[in-house]
Image (spheres, rainbow, N blue to C red):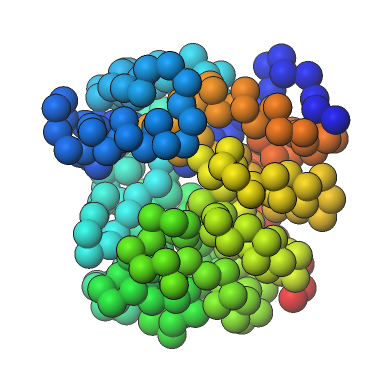
């Protein structure tokens, strides 16, 4: 069932350096470092749970990416009431580094519609970022992705031909908002917009798979939750219809990159699927070596 593990092509769809923010363990002895070490243990890191401290410098982060053999690492911004990783910061990290790809972020509820739309344009056209992240469940108040405040963002991203990335999963402050169902309305309204779910709505795995079954413009990146209980359903689905809609992410610095690749190769993915999950689907989505992915009709 599994492919040979020698030198697979890999695009890591969720990979952030520790130096990006204290939340990622930037500062020695800080609560952020304690949290990062705790989360590494929680998601099955083998060996040193402080491995990520190497990426407290730009040089150390690039060494991590290169030592893991990644083709590309995707560095994701955030814009929420609780954490703002500015698009200019993401651009500064990835600029001039061909291995690194940046994803911008906006929050129209915080910024207002006009400012958020202008920032989407700037992030894509000026900064060269490859997509836009929004985090409805982390708002104040939390929202679902089909809240009307986000529809102008979806429309502009679809016009620009870039994907929208959604933050999902069990770290949502209110778990009632870790729900795939509202995305159906978005997928219907914007059938040519790739919608990418970080954390894959785990532990609501079956619901997420059902959504992706119905809408082929929905993509799942379970990242560190691909290795948690219940996630075998992602693998079973990827060996069938989901083979073109599942993508790999390590969620570094919360899990080692190399270990996550090794663990992914041991999950039971069919040999014909592995390259798509580890590389090909992300390459299509991001327009690497080809035209960007165009979702089919709803």
Task: Residue 128: give x, y in percent of width and height.
Answer: 42, 48
Position of the N terminus by quadrant? top right
- For the image, the number of numbered tags is 0
Q: Looking at the image, which residue is at 55% across and 29% down?
A: 260
Residue 69 vs residue 104: left or right? right
Q: Is residue 165 visible?
A: no
Task: Residue 54: give x, y in percent of width and height.
Answer: 31, 18
Q: Looking at the image, which residue is at 63% across and 63% down?
A: 208
Q: Is residue 213 visible?
A: yes
Q: Is residue 118 above or below residue 290?
A: below
Position of the C terminus by quadrant? bottom right
Q: Nearer the viewer, residue 290 or 151?
A: 151
Task: Residue 113: give x, y in percent of width and height.
Answer: 32, 79
Q: Looking at the image, which residue is at 65% across and 66% down?
A: 207
Q: Nearer the viewer, residue 229 or 197?
A: 229
Q: Nearer the viewer, residue 162 or 141?
A: 141
Task: Residue 251: give x, y in percent of width and height.
Answer: 45, 38
Q: Is residue 260 above or below residue 48?
A: below
Residue 30 vs residue 245: left or right? left
Residue 12 vs residue 148: left or right? right
Q: Looking at the image, which residue is at 58% across and 49% down?
A: 221
């Amino acid at each position: 069932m599994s492919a040979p593990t020698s030198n697979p092509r890999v695009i890591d769809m969720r990979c952030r350096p520790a130096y990006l923010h204290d939340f990622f363990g930037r500062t020695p002895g800080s609560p952020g470092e304690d949290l990062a070490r705790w989360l590494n243990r929680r998601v099955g890191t083998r060996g040193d749970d402080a491995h990520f401290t190497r990426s407290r410098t730009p040089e150390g982060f690039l060494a991590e990416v290169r030592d893991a053999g990644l083709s590309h690492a995707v560095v994701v911004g955030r814009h929420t009431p609780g954490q703002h990783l500015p698009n200019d910061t993401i651009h500064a990290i990835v600029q001039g580094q061909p291995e690194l790809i940046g994803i911008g972020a906006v929050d129209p509820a915080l910024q207002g519609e006009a400012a958020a739309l202008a920032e989407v344009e700037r992030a894509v056209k000026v900064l060269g970022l490859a997509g836009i992240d929004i985090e409805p469940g982390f708002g104040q108040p939390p929202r679902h992705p089909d809240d009307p405040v986000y529809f102008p963002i979806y429309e502009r991203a679809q016009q620009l031909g870039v994907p929208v990335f959604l933050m999902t999963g069990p770290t949502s402050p209110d778990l009632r908002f870790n729900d795939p169902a509202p995305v159906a309305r978005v997928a219907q309204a914007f059938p040519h917009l790739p919608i990418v779910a970080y954390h894959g709505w785990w532990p609501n795995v079956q619901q997420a798979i059902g959504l992706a079954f119905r809408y082929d413009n929905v993509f799942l990146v379970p990242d560190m939750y691909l290795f948690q209980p219940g996630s075998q359903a992602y693998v079973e689905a990827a060996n069938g219809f989901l083979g073109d809609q599942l993508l790999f992410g390590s969620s570094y610095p919360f899990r080692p990159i190399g270990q996550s690749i090794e663990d992914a190769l041991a999950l039971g993915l069919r040999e014909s699927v592995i390259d798509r999950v580890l590389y090909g689907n992300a390459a299509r989505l991001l327009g690497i070596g080809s035209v960007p992915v165009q979702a089919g009709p709803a």
